[in-house]
Image (cartoon, rainbow, N blue to C red):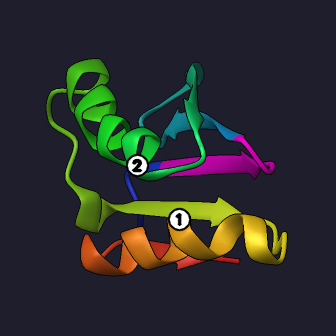
Amino acid sequence: MKYQFVIGLDISKHSFNMAILLANHPEKIFHNAFSNDENGFKDLIPFVHETIPDFEITKALFCMEATGLYCNALLQFFQTQQANVWV
């Protein structure tokens, strides 16, 4: 599958940073930071939709490093969203 969006995540105990790369506009990079809790997870998808109106989660690949306990809750959130995740 060819992804239209690649989203890199840098996760720490209290927050995570997100950078969005567009396959058709690689010169554009969008960035935001969120709290690493349910409130941050709930803010993530609306931010992406506001930033990229034609965003579809099934056409995105979320990439993150394995940070032990710090990434587990976010991974569970992505499962509920049926997101493609690469750890």
Q: In the image, is residue 63 part of the stretch drawn in magenta?
A: no
Q: Mark on residue 41?
A: 2
Q: Residue at the location (63% across, 76% down)? A: 72
Q: Is residue 61 above or below residue 8?
A: below
Q: Residue furthest left?
A: 54
Magenta range? 6-14
Q: Nearer the viewer, residue 6 or 62?
A: 62
Q: Residue at the location (83% across, 77% down)? A: 68
At label 2, the amino acid type is Phe
For the N terminus, the image quarter is bottom left
The answer to whether one can see residue 1 in this image is no
Circle 2 residues within 10 Å: few <14, some 14–19, many ≥20: some
Q: Nearer the viewer, residue 3 or 43?
A: 43
Q: Residue at the location (39% across, 69% down)? A: 77
Q: Where residue 65 sits: x, y (%)? A: 81, 67
Q: Residue at the location (55% across, 32% down)? A: 34
In which image quadrant can residue 31 be found? top right
